[in-house]
Image (tube, rainbow, N blue to C red):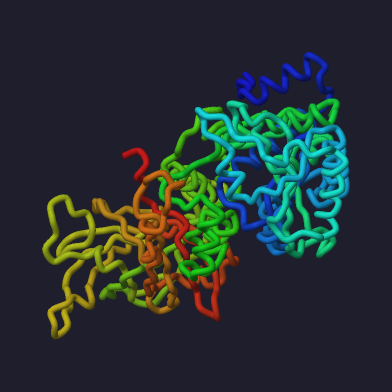
Amino acid sequence: MADAANFIEQIIDEDLASGRVTSIQTRFPPEPNGYLHIGHAKAMFVDFGTAKKYGGKCNLFFDDTNPSKEKTEYVEAIRADIRWMGYDWAKEVYASDFFDRIYEYAEQLILGGKAYVCDLSAEEIKNTRGTLTEPGQESPYRNRTPEENLRLFREMKEGKYRDGEKCLRAKIDMASPNINLRDPVIYRILRAEHHRTGNKWCIYPMYDYAHPICDYLQGVTHSLCTLEFEDHRPLYDWVGITLGFSPKPRQIEFARLNLTNLVMSKRYLKKLVEEHSVRGWDDPRMPTLAGLRNRGIPARAILDFCERAGVSKAQSECEIGYFEAVVRDDLNLHAPRAMAVVSPLKLTIVNYTGSETLDFEINQLDPAAGTRKVDFSSTLFIERDDFSLDPPPKYHRLRLGGYVRLKNAYIVRADEAVKDEAGNVVEVRCTYFPESRSGNDTSGIKAKGVLHWVNAETCVDAELRRYDHLLRDADYAGQDFSERINLDSEHIFRAKAEKYLEAAEEGKAFQLMRTGYYKKCTEEGKLVLSEIVSLKDNFNK
């Protein structure tokens, strides 16, 4: 049975059935003023996914109408993120591709009496716009003749006026119940070098004006936007209708993706980078796609999360624990297993001599993954917390006289604890039982606990990094985060890891047994194990 169509697809189905459109064209429209974050993954999922479902096309459209904040660096990062997510675009398009046409349309509005040059400052325009219950005040420059407006607008283009001295406003309705229709500014003077057009222009169109024009010129049939653009849709439609676009693109809004404990604002993310609160846009703690990729989160898990979250009109918020649960489910199925000890305690098997290699399950959930070899000897490291001289009730780890199984190896019994001068246990001496080897256990010994370990003779030093959330609490991430930011969100430990990890593929994700999911990387010749997500699932609780 096919999945039920979401509300966007229902609208598209109606448009196709009525003949309003015969094919589907969407666009993914980031502004190149920062790196994409996980919220943009939801927009990708909708924009690219909808086009694919209907056999249509999706363009990559860069909204580069604000040159003071835009960089080629961000353009390149956005391209990389989209490809990492598994998408590709039909065409790469920029608003700046259409600057000449957008300007011509502005002159058309002026000559038709639908736009005028206004001398009010930005603050004066704001103060005369009115409120939700009171109409705005008309500008004293609203009734200039088309000829005078055209002359002034061309002088704006030629650079005759200072930044902010004049602007071009659409002439709509200062009493409209929708404040966005109260003669919005559609062009402003802005002397800033553009990352593509250089200093050709000193006036730039506003997004709400350029958006419907660029959609139309690209052939977009359905302009899919997040919900904050719903109040702007009447202006989107006004531009298309007034300029005679046929067929006029249809704007449809859907709820954006909000996650607790994450900073979901490019402006704030940029501030974190600039203030060096994080290492950069791709810091593993960042919710940017570059950060998630660097953390080791698979793109398929992000897409799975977007699909589970669904497409709706209602604004909502997901717990970060749900996202982590989806990532954990994916890694549990795909990540090979390995062993590392964070707080090592020496374990000596007094009756074992020599060394051997044992079969180690790569992933017990994937029988096809098979096994690999792991070195075993008489001297091992286990976690310090896995041995207790005074164990609590129902303690299934190692105690004097107690038995545990060493993962994929043998059952051992703790016989003696060696202490240093301060009374700290520095070594546990054990007896092993040769007939208890994993896969061929004939010992008859029942050991409830299973411990991970590393071979002290062949293990390697590793730096293990663990992360907390950037925000201390789960309040809505759109709030001001400055007093809630968790600056102590990275914790570094020294660990002992099996040598297998040192030779493993860079960037590969592993489940470190009983520790968590970690990404392997090498920095300055040093093995680094960087946490992706913990083993503990807090979401269901």
Q: In front here: 335 or 165?
A: 165
Left or right of residue 184: residue 376: left
State the image coordinates of residue 5 (x, y, percent, origin top left).
63, 22
Point out the image quarter for the C terminus: top left
Q: In front here: 40 or 423?
A: 40
Q: In front here: 502 or 18?
A: 18
Instruction: Specify whether residue 360 is in view.
Output: no
**Residue drawn at point x = 68 percent, y = 34 percent:** 224
> Vertical placement of 457 versus 446: above or below?
below
Q: How many marks?
A: 0
**Residue drawn at point x = 57 percent, y = 51 percent:** 37
State the image coordinates of residue 79 (x, y, percent, origin top left).
72, 55
Instruction: Specify whether residue 118 is in view.
Output: yes
> Vertical placement of 400 versus 187: above or below?
below
List the single residue furthest toward the bottom: 421
List the single residue furthest toward the top: 18
Tell me where residue 211 sits by quadrant.
top right
State the image coordinates of residue 319 (x, y, percent, origin top left).
41, 42
State the image coordinates of residue 177 (x, y, percent, origin top left).
58, 26
List the single residue furthest toward the front: 140
Point out the image quarter for the N terminus: top right
**Residue drawn at point x = 72 percent, y = 52 percent:** 166
> Vertical placement of 483 versus 342: above or below?
above
Tell me where residue 18 sits by quadrant.
top right
**Residue drawn at point x = 79 percent, y = 30 percent:** 240
